[in-house]
Image (cartoon, rainbow, N blue to C red):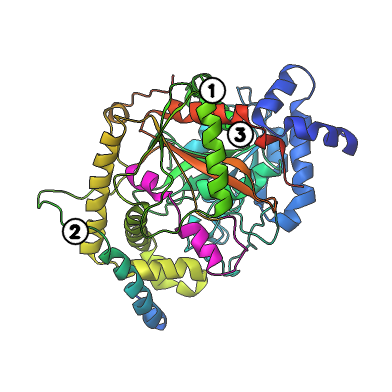
Amino acid sequence: MIPPQYAARAVELAKGITAIAARLPRDWPKEHPPANPACEATTASAKTGEQKNG
Amino acid sequence: MKSALSIHCMQSEVMTVAGALAAMAEGRAKAEDILEACLARIAALNNTLHAVHYLDAAGARAARNPGPLAGIPWGIKDNFDVAGQPCIANSRLRAGRIATSDAPIVSMLRKTGAPLLGKLATWEYGTGTGAEHFDLPNPPARNPWDRARFTGGSSTGAGVAVATGMALFAIGSDTTGSVRLPAAATGCCGVLMTPNVLPMEGGLPNTYSMDRPGPITWTAKDAALVLDAMLGTQLRAAGSAGAKGLRVAVVRDPGPGLPAAQPELAAAFEAGLSVLSRLGARLTEAKLPWPASTCLDAARVIGAAESASIHEDELRRAPELMGAALRDKLLAGMGVSAVDYLAAQRFRRAFTTEMERFWDAYDVVLCFGTLHLPPRLGVEPESSNYTMETMLTPASLAGLPALVQCNGFSETGLPLHWQIMTRQGNEAAMFRAAMAFEGATDWRSRRPA
């Protein structure tokens, strides 16, 4: 919910962020999922907690 | 009581973690001398630099825990909880808030014996748009290399405190550059580890999916020492192995949608490559699988939407208490459609997967951090460009370890920098490059006047 006193500013800023989003690639295969919105461990070493830090 | 002379004589030697530990081990300095020197610098400089928002000198003097970092004073960005201390995050929305317990990262550092000085400057809630509006409860921190210039944000006090020796290391948090930009702007070393290696719990969130805490130190060696003490890793030993044979992807070109790096940054980058080449690193010109500008677009959409979700209730209840930077970011985030948010997260998945393959050929990526020199504070679009026109977001999106270090100075005396990234879990390679470069150059001998 946008406070009414900032509605005009919100419209202006929404145009800006929508323009940024419009530059993103969209032509993924239908089965291509979004990233999980959490800091993911994406490598096997990170998933298992193994570190190569000596 | 320490004389001003004795504090002065100690300064250059004990303004690093490694130097202070060595001085204490060899009996040339005591922990209380090092702490009092930090406090003296805070007393002398903080009225103009505004790096420390809350000082707990008594608590630091009372700290007597043994440990690998005993006697090494440090500070933490004021968006992490420290029991009994304010956690205001430079926001009127949090006036009077006192934390009742330590964030896990604070607990980890207390166990190392390092005395905590207090809370360091931040943008409101550790976020913003890059613009400086001079409308937060505390005045903005000032860059010690040129007080008319920006410190990098959002951990605005962390780099200042370390560069000036107010603290020997600091902990900040980074979503799309908030540890790395302050390190770049103040000539320090800023490090992001693999996600979840350092805990973000007990820190006020900026986003759900990109926030990471990280140390800021004067040297890469100091960062390794601090991380080893916290985590039990052997990064200092691993980093001492040198750069010989290291497979370095050199990414000079930020790609379409971003400007070229400013000439002095580019020149320092090339000079640094020559150093690494002489040290035996195997340099190969490379490109990231997607332009940094696409990563930036995705990070902006994700960051705005997630911040708006986190702060939605405050935006509804008390928008007038917010600074303009936070409010603008949230208002923009409220305008992100669910489909656009998911488009950004779908791109993130693809980019992260492609970066996994990238590491088959390389150990580290060497690229720019921001593409600009530290800008004049509050001068637009300089300040926003400094924060937004960067190569920092690929690591943010893919959760890559990353390190920014100083690699020279401009003609006007401003610090220059580059960024090293690596695969998750392979921080040792990143430290090999950074520590080898540091050991082969003398950029660490210069401090702000």
Q: CA distance from mark 3 to mark 2?
A: 42 Å
Label 3's element?
Answer: loop
Give the crowd class for mark 1: few <14, some 14-19, many >=20 residues within 10 Å: many
The amino acid on which the numbered mark 2 sits, given as a three-letter code, is Arg
Q: Nearer the viewer, residue B289 or B349?
A: B289
Q: Chain of mark 1?
A: B
The amino acid on which the numbered mark 3 sits, given as a three-letter code, is Thr
Q: Chain of mark 2?
A: A
Query: For the N terminus of chain B, which image quadrant?
Result: top right
- Point out the stretch of residues depicted in magenta: B373-398
Q: CA distance from mark 1 to mark 2?
A: 43 Å
The amino acid on which the numbered mark 1 sits, given as a three-letter code, is Arg
Quarter of the view holding residue A46: top left
Label 1's element?
Answer: helix
Q: Which mark is residue B236?
A: 1
Say if B156 sits above or below B8 in the image.
below
* Residue at left offset 66%, top offset 45%: B161
Place of residue B183 in the rendered image (x, y in percent of width and height, measured from the top left): 57, 45
Q: Which mark is residue A26?
A: 2
Place of residue B75 in the rendered image (x, y in percent of width and height, measured from the top left): 62, 42
Place of residue B347 in the rendered image (x, y in percent of width and height, measured from the top left): 24, 52
Give the crowd class for mark 2: few <14, some 14-19, many >=20 residues within 10 Å: few
Answer whether residue A26 is visible to the viewer in this image. Answer: yes
